[in-house]
Image (cartoon, helix red, strand yellow):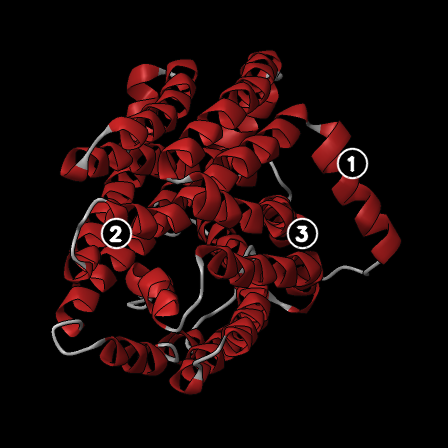
Amino acid sequence: MGFCHSFMVLIPVFVPLLQGYGLSMSEVLQTQALFALTIAVCEVPSGYIADIWGRRNAVILGSILNGFGFFSLLWADTFVDFLVYEFILGVGFSLISGADLALLYDTELYLASIGAKDRAGAGKSLSRLISIEAAASGIAGIVASILLIWSLDWVVWVQAVTGFLPFVLGLFLVEPPRPGRTVNHRESARRIVGLLLFDKPVVAWTAFAISVFGLLAVYVFWIYQKYWELQGIPIGQFGYIWAGFALTVSLAARYSSALEKKLGYRKLLVLIAALPLLGLLGMAFGQGWLGLLFGLAIQVSRGISMSLFYEALNRRVPGDFRATVNSLVSLGVRGIFIVTGPMLGYALDTQGMTNTLLGLIVIFTPLMCLVLVPLISRIRQEPKEEIMDAVVAS
């Protein structure tokens, strides 16, 4: 199901598609700001609904909405039409976001509690999910380039049909049993806020780290296609390039645990901060395919950081609030993008690619230091019994 959610043949050519309908980069990023705003409004309620109503139900409802959203592209040809599309997808993705990770993590913990054999473990399953989703994005990129042999319309049609696959697969999900509990919404809210801000400092700083690294990843995600266009790369190659970038994330996520064991968490955190900054610098001054290759450094960091941070977060969060906390973390990224996304598009339209990339370096270098230094310190101070509990749980 995670594979089908990420198998979006539209994404590798989404910017050229919208530009073909007369949208500027500022307007393209405005559509993404609406997507982020919709998620910001729905993210936390949907995560809480998943915790109370059931993760399976939330995932199924979100999947059917996504399917209808992709189907709406068949008649979309104006700025308003694309705004409607992003709104529908925003509601759908907000229902799935957090619920899918919580469902997977809880399933592994349940299998461990009943002594099931041949289980991967919660931490490894999360990294595998991230790896599979990235691989699906890569394969979608290859398919997109093949479909472009005919036209962009073929890409839209295939997306409209395959968009319903996650809903079909969602019907076969089985949610592990959870202890029944009386719901006190005020007490639940108090516990969630306490967990994120006061009770476990590592949880708070891990959430901040996900927000910072996730925000940079979203920015670069929407810069890539415009960057390739400016480097003179034909649109027919976009899908293949996208595949290579996505598969890089997949491999980085797949081997993140091995890298952590080899380097230690401190060296690994420094590495995932240095790589995207190096990638942005190389893209700013590199030309053609050389600049494109520097973007791979950002993808390596993305794969490692997603796996490392989300596994660290989920193993320290109680199962009752796992979907809500995951949604709150995603909200941090989306909330900032609501305001800054259109500003990024405006900067690209008025200041050019090189100045925009250098501006991101200036902004994110101190932000990464501000987040990682306290995180490393808090991990070092974390009580040993909490670390052991987390290891046993994962």
| Nearer to us in this view, 158 or 357 | 357
User: Of helix, strand and loop, which one carries label 1?
Assistant: helix
Q: Is residue 7 left or right of residue 63?
A: left
User: Of helix, strand and loop, which one carries label 3?
Assistant: helix
Q: Is residue 326 left or right of residue 170?
A: right
x%, y% of residue 287?
Answer: 19, 34
x%, y% of residue 313?
Answer: 55, 37
Q: Amino acid at mark 3?
A: Asp
Q: Earlier in the sequence, mark 1 or mark 2?
A: 1
User: Of helix, strand and loop, which one carries label 2?
Assistant: helix
| Nearer to us in this view, 348 or 222 | 348
Circles 2 and 3, Cβ within 8 Å, touching? The answer is no
Residue 119 seen in render: no
Task: Give me the disc on residue 320.
Answer: 3
Q: Amino acid at mark 2?
A: Glu
Q: Amino acid at mark 1?
A: Gly
| Nearer to us in this view, 147 or 137 | 147
x%, y% of residue 26?
Answer: 50, 55
Label 3 Cα neighbours within 10 Å, binned few <14 / some 14-19 / many ≥20: some
Q: In the rendered image, which quarter is residue 45 located in?
A: bottom right
Q: Is residue 125 left or right of residue 52?
A: left
Q: In the rendered image, which quarter is residue 30 located in?
A: bottom right
Task: Give me the disc on residue 194.
Answer: 1
Determine which residue is flagged by label 2: 229
Circles 1 and 2, Cβ within 8 Å, touching? The answer is no
In three-dimensional space, the C-alpha distance between marks 2 and 3, rounded to whole angstroms, equals 46 Å
In three-dimensional space, the C-alpha distance between marks 3 and 1, rounded to whole angstroms, equals 14 Å
Q: Residue at x 29, y 58 (%)?
A: 137
